[in-house]
Amino acid sequence: MDYLHDLHSFLPGIIVAIAGLIVIMLDAFKKSIAVSYSVAVFGLGIAVLVAIQSLFGDSGTAFSGMIVYGGTGAFGTVVVLLGALFCVIISKDYLEDLDLHNGEVYAMVLFSVTGMLGLAVSNDLITLFISLETMSICLYVLAGLMKNEKIGAEAALKYFLLGAFSTGFLLYGIALIYGATGHTNLVEIAAAAEPTLLFFAGSALLLVGIFFKIAAVPFHMWTPDVYQGTPTTLTAFMATAAKSATFVAFILVLTRMLPDSEAGDWTNVIQVMAIITMIVGNLIALAQDNVKRMLAYSSIAHAGYLMVGLAAGTAAGYSGVLYYLFAYTLMNVGAFGVIAYYERNHGLDFTQIDSYAGLGFKVPVMGVMLSVFLFSLAGIPPLVGFVGKYYVFAAAIQAGLIPLAIIGVLASAASVYYYLRVMVYLYFKEAHKEYSLKQPGFMFKTTLILLAVLTIYYGIEPVLPTTGLIELINSYYAL
């Protein structure tokens, strides 16, 4: 009955894949788009419940060691599914207003999520590659959804070309690692690896492929154009769910594949990448007048903060990264969701920051929520973004990487400027002209309010007299 155990270990991914197949069949038979949307939400909702249950179960491997279940992979699965679910819910009204609401969108999202879930539990380089490509191909399609607009076509083309280029690095890296060790299973690679040039070259190329997917400098070139040209709610999906899945796969590679004797060498590489990514991401974000491009460079900087935890190379560092991914999903989906709401108003240009002048008083609840999400992204207490940064920087300090932590704190402090700049326009600048905004839909507004409440709750949760989320994550790395 091993096959039943295998299927159960990847049940969330199977549920999402089946939902994707149902959606694509419904669309083929010209059924109502509302039905496809409902199937997507229901499938993701059921998968979230199953994944949350697996957080408290056993851990191990399945499918002949190709994937892991429980622990890190289980938490990564929950984060990916939550990000996808929130993004799908807020996409309906937004895509309807842009005349882009069709069944294929939800099918691509679900198939992409299937790849992300495989990526988050990969214990083999073959599984990692297949999952990464399944995710990426669907994202290339979603990036080009606004095919009749120049920025949409540009986003899809740049993402596809640079993504294919990075895939070459990844695949060559896998080939060299297999040549050096004779294995593709992460644990077996660690057991057979020797410090040879072939193994170092393969590992380096593998990391280049991963760095591209997480938008680390200097592999970030695609990010601002793709984020700007993709429909905003789908940009949120790419910025949260895809990044979370890749970072969890990164953790699995670091903890299961790279030998302990070589860990220090890769820690130095990750430190340098983290420093460059934090500094470049924040410096360029400071100069942005386009809000979506500003958030794109902001996401690059956040990748740098996450790599600070990876550079620590400790249980506390990896726990901090997992918590930060959860926090980042809440606040980033919320921020992009509010921006998507403003973009829904036809005839008004809300791409430039000066167009946000006076908007805070037009629909007060949306202005307040955007402020909450931006404060959290900046790392202002008592919001979840502050807690996430605290955990990754504290782990770096505990690991003796004090200069890295100081650079991270200073970079985070610099980011306050461009986040607060948006709020200055919201509340302290007068609108250039009189106009009215649509009222947000019930599900759209409810989802954003829930995200804002969670952003505040998990900001104060660590000081509450209850077992916190970080304790659960820490249990995955307990000896």
Image: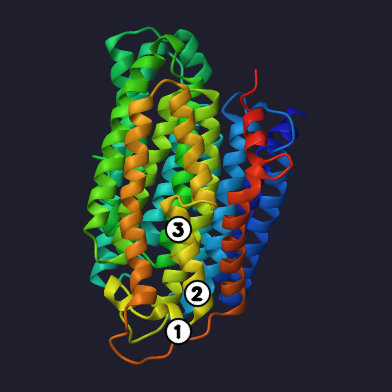
Contact? badges 3 and 1 (CB < 8 Å)? no
Say which of 110 and 241 sits in front. 241
Q: Amino acid at mark 3?
A: Phe
Contact? badges 1 and 2 (CB < 8 Å)? yes
82 lies above or below 213: below
Question: Which residue bears the numbered disc 2?
Answer: 366
- CA gap, disc 1 and disc 2: 9 Å
Q: Residues within 10 Å of mark 2 (few under 14, many from 20)?
A: many
Question: Which residue bears the numbered disc 3?
Answer: 375
| Residue name at image x 67 percent, y 28 percent | 475
Q: Amino acid at mark 1?
A: Lys
Is residue 270 in sight in this rendering?
no
| Residue name at image x 56 percent, y 35 percent | 121
3 or 1: tag closer to the N-terminus: 1
Where's residue 24, x and y in %?
55, 63
- CA gap, disc 2 and disc 3: 14 Å
Q: Amino acid at mark 2?
A: Met
Q: Which SS class for mark 3?
A: helix
